[in-house]
Image (tube, rainbow, N blue to C red):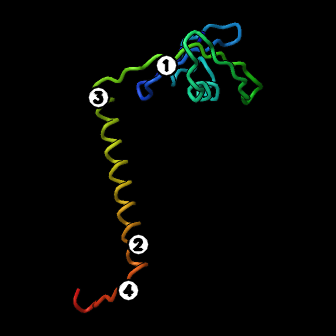
Amino acid sequence: MATRSSPRSSLSRSAIVPAVGVTATRTSAEVPSDLRNHLFRMPSPPAGEPEYEVVELSNGYAVVRLDNVIDGELNEEEALKQENYKRRLDNSTASAEIYAFLRMLRSQSEIQVYEDRL
């Protein structure tokens, strides 16, 4: 069984790796990266009912069994980094929306710019 968790993700996922029980985080090398990435994109299974998927890997295929999802925890430093990143994204989105709104207003208006008065 492989359990994966990441401080940047609020989820831990469990899966059975053929003939090998492995506990791994998002960045551990025990499970191939393409398999880890797929595992974290799988839908959360209903309680007590595993989710199965076939994953195409660079060297073949793997059958993944996702048993459960466990909430992860962020330490204080990681939570602060996450909040700062969220603020930067919010500011970027707001700026893009303002510029798009101004472009729309300018396209619908007749504007005269007096360059000598600027």
Question: Are the residues flagged by discs 2 and 1 in contact, CB closer than 8 Å?
Answer: no
Mark 1: give few (<14), some (14-19) or many (20+) Cα within 10 Å: many
What kind of residue is marked 4? Glu
Comparing labels 2 and 3, the label whose residue is closer to the camera = 2
How far apart marks 4 and 1 lie (CA) works out to 56 Å
Is residue 12 rendered to the left or right of residue 1? Answer: left
The residue that label 3 is drawn on is: 77
Q: Earlier in the sequence, mark 2 or mark 1?
A: 1
* Residue type, numbered disc 3: Glu
Closer to the N terminus: mark 2 or mark 3?
3
Nearer to us of marks 3 and 1 is: 1
**Front residue of this view, candidates 110 and 7:** 110
Q: Which residue position is annotated with label 2?
A: 103
- The local secondary structure at tag 4 comes to loop
Q: Give SS at disc 1.
A: strand
Say the numbered circle drawn on residue 98: none
Q: Label 1 belongs to which residue?
A: 12
Instruction: Read off the residue under disc 4.
Output: 110
Please report whichever mark, 4 or 1, sits nearer to the chain's N-terminal start.
1
The C terminus lies in quadrant: bottom left
* Label 2 residue SS: helix
Depth check, mark 4 against mark 1: the one in front is: 4
Image position of 14 with respect to 118: above or below: above
In the picture, residue 22 is in which quadrant? top right
Of the numbered discs 3 and 1, the one sitting upstream in the chain is: 1
Q: Residue at x 33, y 29 (%)?
A: 78
Q: Position of residue 75 (x, y in %)?
A: 31, 23
